[in-house]
């Protein structure tokens, strides 16, 4: 994590693997496919997301084979107690504005695994996301207000982005009320 407690791309991959195993045991190949499929559908293929090999998660004691050894025999894997603690640590990290592809993936992972957190952590994460989107909206509206002159289609595009951010904020505020 960066000093401000935000995830880096390789930690997003770790979260994807640990969160998936926190929901159920999976065979090695199934887990690798789940992580790849989810991340690529959110951000597309990305060299930034060449994550920690699942074998390293085994060596670190975060996941363990239930039957077999690992990749070579497509062992069934499960998350360990240490892995669950790491998953919670990653889930309770911050997200930084502006929303880029990696942050979009982190938010998607938080939404996918939010139910795995206790009520207090769940509420805190939604609060953090609301604050982040409010900062994003403030940044965009400040840009809209401070920019002068003809920018071609820039203002049209910016207005669309502001509208989408307002809609996202409304959705997250509704979620904030639902998890309270």
Image (cartoon, rainbow, N blue to C red):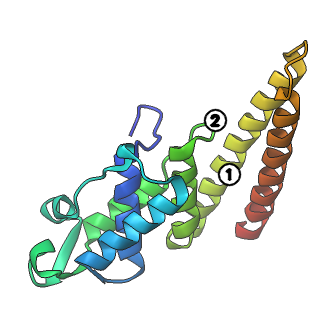
Q: Which of marks 2 and 1 is nearer the N terminus?
A: 2
Location of residue 125 (image quadrant): bottom right
Residue at 22% x, 58% y is: 53
Cα–Cα span, label 2 and label 1: 16 Å
Hey, which residue is sitting farthest top in the picture? 149
Residue at 28% x, 70% y is: 81
Q: Judge by depth and name the residue closer to the eye, 92 or 111.
A: 111
Q: How crowded is mark 2: few (under 14 residues within 10 Å), some or many (20 or more)?
A: some
Which image quarter holds the C terminus? bottom right
Q: Judge by depth and name the residue closer to the eye, 118 or 87.
A: 87
Q: Where is 130 relative to 85, above or below?
A: above
Determine which residue is flagged by label 1.
127
Which image quarter holds the N terminus? top left
- Residue 102 place in picture, x, y as percent: 50, 45
Which secondary structure lies at badge 2? Answer: loop
Q: Where is 133 relative to 22, above or below?
A: above
């Amino acid at each position: 994590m960066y000093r401000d407690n935000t995830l880096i791309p390789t930690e997003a991959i770790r979260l994807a693997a640990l969160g998936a195993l926190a929901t159920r045991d999976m065979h090695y190949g199934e887990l690798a496919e789940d992580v790849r499929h989810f991340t690529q559908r959110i951000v597309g293929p990305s060299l930034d997301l060449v994550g920690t090999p699942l074998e390293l998660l085994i060596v670190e004691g975060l996941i363990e084979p239930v039957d077999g050894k690992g990749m070579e025999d497509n062992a069934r894997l499960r998350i360990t107690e240490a892995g669950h603690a790491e998953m919670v640590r990653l889930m309770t990290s911050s997200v930084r504005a502006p929303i880029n592809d990696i942050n979009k993936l982190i938010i998607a992972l938080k939404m996918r695994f939010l139910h795995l957190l206790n009520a207090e952590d769940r509420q805190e994460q939604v609060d953090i996301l609301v604050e982040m989107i409010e900062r994003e909206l403030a940044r965009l509206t400040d840009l809209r207000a401070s920019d002068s002159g003809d920018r071609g289609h820039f203002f049209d595009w910016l207005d669309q982005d502001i509208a989408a951010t307002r809609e996202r904020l409304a959705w997250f505020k509704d979620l904030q009320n639902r998890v309270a």
